[in-house]
Image: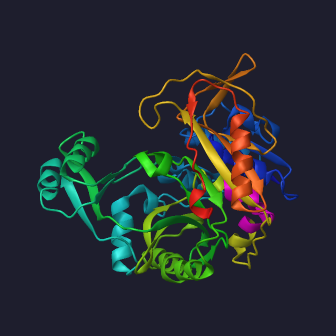
Amino acid sequence: MKVLVIGAGGREHVLAHKLSQSPLVNEIHAIPGNDAMLDVAIIHTEIAETDHEKIVTFARQNEIAWTIIGPEQPLTEGLTDKLQAADIKVFGPNQDAAQIEGSKLFAKQLMEKYKIPTAEYKEITNKHNALQYIESCEYPVVLKKDGLAAGKGVIIASNYEEAQAGVETLYPEEEGVVVFEQYLEGEEFSLMTMVNGDYAVPFDCIAQDHKRAYDNDQGPNTGGMGAYCPVPHIDESILKRTNDDIAQPIAQAMVKEGYSFFGVLYIGAIITADGPKVIEFNARFGDPEAQVLLTRMESDLMQHIIDLEAKAPINFEWKDNAVVGVMLASKGYPGQYEKGHQVSGFNLNGDYFISGLKKENDVYITSGGRVILALGEGENIAKAKDNAYEAVDKIESEGLFYRKDISNKAIK
């Protein structure tokens, strides 16, 4: 069958790479794709992922059997709805269901109504009220912009001054919705769940992302500076409780509210003294979690999608090896950063997945904030980490930085 992947980042690179291993798939297209995907897909950089009409026309003309949507923006803007109206199958929720990521407030209200464990919150709709609220709220407090923010719309303020700066950042104008949340103490993890309406099948392998820009979880939030799987110090009982208390109830809640979710629901969770609680939902694979999880997955992703559609049993198979991925980002990210730095020393054999590189005159140069994820595999997390940083050391560039402590929490 022919498959179309929407998106241009590292998540889409690994999706195309993984789908290319399926005996069910004989042709992969990527819109817009990136230059590093050429080994596994036919890329169409002339079509933007925001140009829904051209995407639908392309899928129709090329007899695409399945479209896999990687990023959040096409989902929240309704690309699934348009493709489905043209009788093209899509792995990715429709616009209404994608609200679970597109609106922090929608997600919080849904969890509150159905008693799904999460932090207490307050919705504030203008800057004046926000400035009043932070004068008397408990600290630390978490500020979340309502809407998509590419992983950078969350500010953790430990005192009034930081909260005041956060309000100025998240309210560029007087009006706007910001969700203020109770700060939760604990260890975070990411659980991908394949969902078709009330049928929810969580991955039986979790990952752990590293959101802060610098070592020891310092600096601003990013889209993710590295990830690893499995997470050996988080035991099966936590996974079972997350499924029982969060994954299954949220799938049921969406159906009861009239939302038909089909795709991957990302559960960003934290282990508190009261058990796992939701930090956030995403309506698609995490990035960089997808890169490590799909590298470790031995079973056929395309077969899993087909089984999900049929609500048939899904049996994931995983390599014995652990996988660690280290993100190299442009210096200055997640703030202002330069583009155009040359990058070399990497291969395209599955050891690296590309987020922000483009080819000019046979040379790769930086074109984004997060640039390239270096992967390592090993019999345990420590060995996988060593191999990942060996892969990092092979990369030559003046314009990149990375964390040196990815996966440390799993190494005793």
* 217 to the left or right of 59: left
Looking at the figure, which quarter contains the N terminus?
A: bottom right
- The residue closer to the viewer here, 110 or 387, is 387
Render colour scheme: rainbow
The quarter holding residue 205 reads bottom right
Q: Main secondary structure of the magenta part?
A: helix
Compared with 379, 61 (above or below) is above
Queried whether the magenta region covers residue 302, the answer comes back as yes
- The residue closer to the viewer here, 296 or 139, is 139
- Can you see residue 268? no
Compared with 354, 183 (above or below) is below
The quarter holding residue 201 reads bottom right
Residue at the limit of the structure toward the front, as seen here: 412
- The residue closer to the viewer here, 324 or 305, is 324
**Residue 392, how many percent across, how many down?**
68, 39
The quarter holding residue 203 reads bottom right
Queried whether the magenta region covers residue 250, the answer comes back as no
* 81 to the left or right of 179: right
Looking at the figure, which quarter contains the C terminus?
A: bottom right
* 173 to the left or right of 245: left
**Residue 247, how many percent across, how many down?**
53, 76
- Can you see residue 326? yes
Report the residue at 80% width, 64% height from top. 319
**Number of numbered discs present?**
0
**Residue 20, how many percent across, how many down?**
82, 50
Report the residue at 63% width, 33% height from top. 47
Q: Which residues are magenta?
A: 292-305
**Residue 236, how many percent across, how many down?**
62, 80
Report the residue at 43% width, 60% height from top. 99
